[in-house]
Amino acid sequence: MDPFTVATGVLGLLGVTIQVSQIVSSYIDGVKNATKAATELSTTLTILHSTLTHLDAFLRSESVRDNSFEYTSVLCSATGACKTRLELLRSKLSKHNSSRMNRAIHQLKWPFDEKENRTAVQDLQGFIQTFQFALTIDGW
């Protein structure tokens, strides 16, 4: 797989990251007991977004144009796994939009307990480290 194809996957991942960040931001604004947990997740998503932006620029640069990535490479696998994780987060966070009654109830409560929130943040931090390592290897 050429770097441009991997970059396209990274762009898709950026899109999901932005969507999840927007949902988390709406919780921060509207849910009083979600401040600490939501802020921690929001900060992690901001770092992920920044890292993915740099990774996209790297993959589109001349220095990797002739490289090839296998579908089983760590970078490709991490991109897919990260997207799956973010989509699960988006799904759970978006449930409050399913109906007017549910929306009012769900907006009063952060949808993750402490363990779920900590696990989500740790998972995303692991992906960030993987992506940052890929950038470090080539001096980005």
Image (cartoon, rainbow, N blue to C red):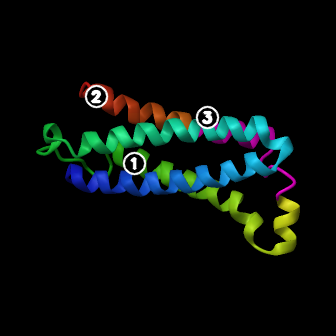
Residue 38 vs 85, above or below: the answer is above
- Residue 42 pos. (x, y %): 63, 41
What number is the disc on residue 77? 1
Q: CA distance from mark 3 to mark 2?
A: 24 Å
Residue 56 vs 13, above or below: the answer is above
Q: Is residue 1 left or right of residue 84?
A: left
What number is the disc on residue 108? none
Residue with the mark numbered 2: 140
Residue at (54% x, 34% y) in the render? 125
**Dot 3 and dot 2 residues touching (CB under 8 Å):** no
**Nearer the camera: disc 1 or disc 2:** 2
Residue 34 sits inside the magenta stretch: no
**Dot 1 and dot 3 residues touching (CB under 8 Å):** no
Mark 1 lies on a secondary structure that is helix
Residue with the mark numbered 3: 122
**Nearer the camera: disc 1 or disc 3:** 3
Q: Name which residue type carries label 2.
A: Trp
Mark 2 lies on a secondary structure that is loop
- Residue 18 pos. (x, y %): 52, 52
Q: Is residue 63 visible?
A: yes
Q: Quadrant of the C terminus?
A: top left
Q: Which residues are magenta?
A: 107-123
- Residue 85 pos. (x, y %): 56, 51
Mark 3 lies on a secondary structure that is helix
Compare marks 3 and 2 and give the one earlier in the sequence: 3
Residue 122 sits inside the magenta stretch: yes
